[in-house]
Image (cartoon, grey):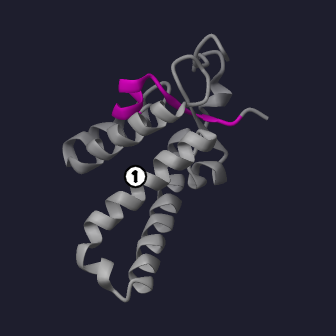
């Protein structure tokens, strides 16, 4: 896949079931980030709970960017056998992982952008959200 992303018409196995898997991966990731922020609050004797939204955003960013940079997938994506690939078909670099995470978080911050992204993931041929389309990336079933 060094020449680019697989064609969804000819290599449909890479995209089969991706929207549902992305949903379950997202739920797993939200649980991990929420549990981490809760634990940080307990460890700081509830001090961080006073600024919980900021802590949640920071933990979410570090978790997503770090896990995507290290293996081109978050733990939820790995559990669902998904990985992110860039426009060349290669795994995302650290820079691409950070950009992907930033674009995802901006889209998630606005309801309209998030709804458009969800519709694009559900109905698009490569199941790309707005942040994926912007960067040319796609979530794929991991090749065996």
Q: Does any portion of residue 94 appear in the rendered image?
A: yes
Q: Position of residue 89 (x, y in %)?
A: 60, 21
Q: Which residue lies at the image location 69% right of the left edge and 36% below the top edge? A: 142
Q: Residue furthest top?
A: 3
Report which residue position mark 1 lands on.
61
Left or right, residue 58 beside residue 139: left
Q: Position of residue 139 (x, y in %)?
A: 54, 35
Nearest the camera: 8 or 53?
53
Left or right, residue 104 beside residue 143: left
In magenta stretch: residue 71: no
Left or right, residue 127 beside residue 81: left
Residue 2 found in image quarter: top right
Q: Residue furthest right?
A: 144
- Residue 92 versus residue 48 in the image, above or below: above
Q: Magenta residues?
A: 129-142
Q: Position of residue 59 (x, y in %)?
A: 41, 61
């Amino acid at each position: 896949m060094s020449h680019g992303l697989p064609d969804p018409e000819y290599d449909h196995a890479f995209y089969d079931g991706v929207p549902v898997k992305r949903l379950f991966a997202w739920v797993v990731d939200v649980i991990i980030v929420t549990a981490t922020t809760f634990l940080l609050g307990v460890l700081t004797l509830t001090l961080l709970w006073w600024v919980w939204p900021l802590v949640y955003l920071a933990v979410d960013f570090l978790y997503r960017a770090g896990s995507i940079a290290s293996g081109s997938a978050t733990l939820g994506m790995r559990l669902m056998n998904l990985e992110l690939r860039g426009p060349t078909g290669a795994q995302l670099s650290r820079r691409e992982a950070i950009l992907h995470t930033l674009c995802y978080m901006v889209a998630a911050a606005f309801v309209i952008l998030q709804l458009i992204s969800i519709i694009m993931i559900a109905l698009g041929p490569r199941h790309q959200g707005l942040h994926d389309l912007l960067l040319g990336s796609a979530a794929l079933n991991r090749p065996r």
